[in-house]
Image: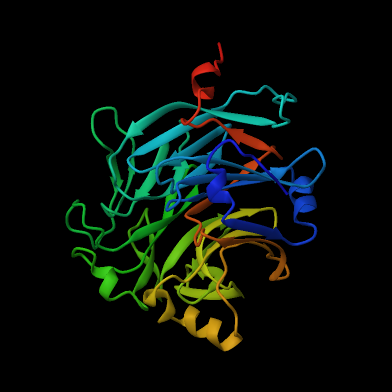
Amino acid sequence: MSEDKSSGHQQLKQISFSSSQHFNTWLMELNISLAFTNARLGKVFLLGTNSEKSLSLFERSLAMPSAIHYEDNQLFLATAYQLWRFINVLENNTATSDGYDRLFIPRGSSVTGDIGIATLNIDAERQPFFVSSLFSCIATTSYEKSFRTLWTPPFISRLVPENRCFLNGMAVINKKPKYVSAWTRADSKTAWIADFKNQGVVVDVESSEIVCQNLTMPTSLVIHDNKLWLAHSGAGYLGVVDVKHNTFMPVIFCPGVITGLEIINHYAVVALSKTSNHRHQDTELGAQLRKRNIEPWCGIFIIDLTRAKLVHWFKIEGTIKEIADITLIEGSIRPSLIGFQSDQVKTTISIG
């Protein structure tokens, strides 16, 4: 595996990466790459393949990057108190001198403050909307305010920075939010910390009705082929929500806290983080890991949903214990991104 050494290489020396034998081939066959974040070390990683067809890992340092989303030639990234918009400036079939086929450069940001952006997407007007865990709402950016509220759960009585229910996952259909997940239906400050087991819910945004409950740590949501896929992280399972019967149907066990989910074709791309404290240990996930005698993972699983089978993996060991979020970059096998710790952001100029 090749590594970009432009920033933070000393930190990377304390991290090791490994993968299944044909993971690089899988990326190339689907003509995709992956981008994922780690908030604690302040890293954004772009994982693709190089001209030698081996894995290539590009990284940049940003302030506490969390939620990330790619769509329509744009890469949106939430950091400590800003929501950044990066635009690819390379024309079709062109590449940088280093062989990268996407070059994302910052083209604007919204100063939201530290509002706990957990999940990102874009609407029909190519504008971002997101889940704010701190304010327990779905929101979008605003020119005049920190953000503009679009929706709040029916059990939240006030828009206050108290992370009352740990709202986090969001499934989108027709460029609009359709379902969200929350760890509880509590309406008091950080109530989910003390009582979250079997308290999680999935809520229909349009009707504000609960479509699934009695969950532990529900996180990522994706609508694919008319099915609502859910990461039931506290149980360790990726599965499907039957919204008509209000039930969760597990499909496959994943050995870690699921913190990100994307689906392409019939493959699920699952980001896993290690169980880092007693909150995760005292769950069904923790019990399953002990029963199976498995150490928790930090990395990425590629799951064939038609067979409910793990087909590829990418493992991270060392100082990185968690992945905050993950996104697919379709049509690119080796992307790059300009950060703010070198003069490159000053000298890379595109003209319309």
Q: Position of residue 141 (x, y in %)?
A: 33, 35
Q: Could you say which is closer to the camera, residue 23 or residue 32?
A: 23
Would you identify the image quadrant in which residue 46 lies? top right
Q: Position of residue 318 (x, y in %)?
A: 56, 61
The residue positioned farthest toward the top in the image shown: 352
Q: How is the image coloured?
A: rainbow
Q: Could you say which is closer to the camera, residue 92 or residue 158?
A: 92
The residue positioned farthest toward the right in the image shown: 52
- 140 over 178 or under it: above or below: above
Q: Residue at x 39, y 37 (%)?
A: 83
The residue positioned farthest toward the bottom in the image shown: 291
Position of the C terminus, as image quadrant, is: top right
Would you identify the image quadrant in which residue 294 lies? bottom right
Q: Does residue 180 appear to the left or right of 185 in the view shown?
A: right
Q: Position of residue 49 (x, y in %)?
A: 74, 44
Q: Position of residue 12 (x, y in %)?
A: 57, 50
- Is residue 151 something one can see in this rendering? yes
- 47 over 316 or under it: above or below: above
Q: Residue at x 50, y 62 (%)?
A: 321
Q: Could you say which is closer to the camera, residue 249 or residue 21?
A: 21
Q: Does residue 206 appear to the left or right of 317 in the view shown?
A: left
Q: Residue at x 32, y 40 (%)?
A: 81
Number of numbered discs on residues = 0
- Is residue 126 something one can see in this rendering? no
Would you identify the image quadrant in which residue 51 lies? top right
Q: Residue at x 71, y 40 (%)?
A: 333
- 352 over 1 or under it: above or below: above
